Amino acid sequence: MGRKHKNSCRKKYQSREIVRYVKKYFAKTSSINIVDYHFEIKQEVVEALKNNAQYEGYEICGVLTGSQVGENRYRISKISPPCVKKHTRCGCERDATIANKFIEEDYEQSEHTRFYIGEWHTHPENNPRPSFVDYSSIKSTYQTASLVVPFLFMIIVGTQAFHVNVYDGNRFVEVNLEIV
Ligand SMILES: [Zn+2]
């Protein structure tokens, strides 16, 4: 979903399949203030994301799981392998079956401490910026997926940098992740 396809993809947008695995326990109408939250990412996840960077050709995509590590403190702990259903002209369509399997297995392996916390995908650009489709896709997933936490990460892996933001149901906020 690189910027070069931005305009041509506006009309082509279709909702991605959704990820479901645990009952949500918060009201999606409740508003949270992202600035009150602290976010961490494990070093090994950063390395894995870098290893998935795509310099040319098709984009790839997958999901992220994480856990709560303190009050208003969350950590991105795991990255799924690429969950690609098909490559489209507008980017990468996620395979919900592969993504759900990863999420469910990680949930069990972690004794129910790690849960679905966001999405990752690649852009073949140095400093990636989200496309219209990227924003729409996260909003749609937020509304339809069963979430444990009232936010979703969007991480875009560029060739030199990541773009990281969090959607809280109202807005997207760029955040800094502490690497642990
Ligand atoms: Zn994109």
Image: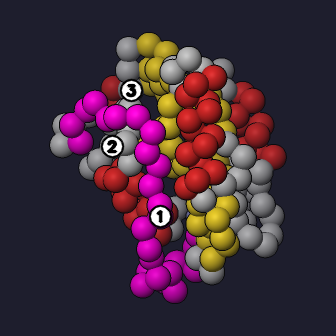
Q: Which mark is residue 131?
A: none
Secondary structure beneath disc 2? loop
The residue that label 1 is drawn on is 16
Q: Position of residue 84 (x, y in %)?
A: 67, 61
Q: Is residue 24 magenta?
A: yes
**Residue at 71% in and 36% down:** 46
**Residue at 74% in and 70% down:** 58
Tag 1: amino acid: Arg
Marks 1/3: CA–CA distance: 28 Å
Tag 3: amino acid: Tyr
Within 10 Å of disc 2 (Cα), the crowding (few <14, some 14-19, many 20+) is many
The residue stretch that appears in magenta: 1-28
Lateral position of residue 10 relative to residue 47, left or right: left
Q: Which mark is residue 37?
A: 3
Answer whether residue 179 is visible to the viewer in this image: no
Lateral position of residue 49 relative to residue 31, left or right: right
Lateral position of residue 136 relative to residue 63, left or right: left
Q: Which mark is residue 168?
A: 2
